Amino acid sequence: MADEHDVRRIAASLPDVVEIPSEGFDFRVAGRGFVWSYPERVAGRPRVIRADIAVLYVGDEAEKQALLLGEPHLFFTTRGYDGLPLVMLRLDGVDADRLAELVTDSWRMRAGTL
């Protein structure tokens, strides 16, 4: 079971990464976000930063749909993310090795190292 500390450790270990000050975590490479805390929005209430859920850049809609359909217990999306190559990951559902793979893949796509 992973948590926000694992996200920080993994993301900070990657080259050229900057952590943006936030209520949760927010990591960027080459000026582009690749993993950050989920800003949950519920109608009629203030936004809540959820550090138990990571938003990951996944590159394109095909990869997004593959993750959502293949592992719906781990990944989800919301209307606010429709049309964007982003998924939300429930951190308590993955181990540190899988999290490292997902965060590193996201970093590679944003850093342009693929």
Image: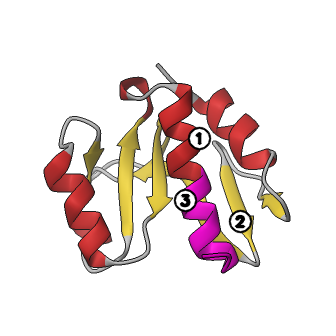
The mark lying in front, picked from 1 and 2, is 1
Which residue is nearer to you in this view: 100 or 79?
100
Q: Which residue is mark 1?
A: 100
Q: Is residue 18 visible?
A: yes
Q: Earlier in the sequence, mark 2 or mark 3?
A: 2
The amino acid type, in three-letter code, at marker 1 is Ala
Q: CA distance from mark 2 to mark 3?
A: 13 Å
- Helix, strand or loop at label 3? It is helix
The question of residue 57 being in magenta is answered with: no
**Left or right: 38, with 111 as reference point:** left
Q: Which residue is mark 2?
A: 28
**Residue at left offset 68%, top offset 76%:** 113
Q: Which residues are magenta?
A: 104-114
**Left or right: 35, with 94 as reference point:** right
- Helix, strand or loop at label 2? It is strand
Across and down, in percent, residue 84 comes to 35, 77
Which residue is nearer to you in this view: 9 or 50?
9
Q: Earlier in the sequence, mark 3 or mark 1?
A: 1
Circle 2 Cα neighbour tier, 10 Å, few/some/many (<14 / 14–19 / ≥20)? many
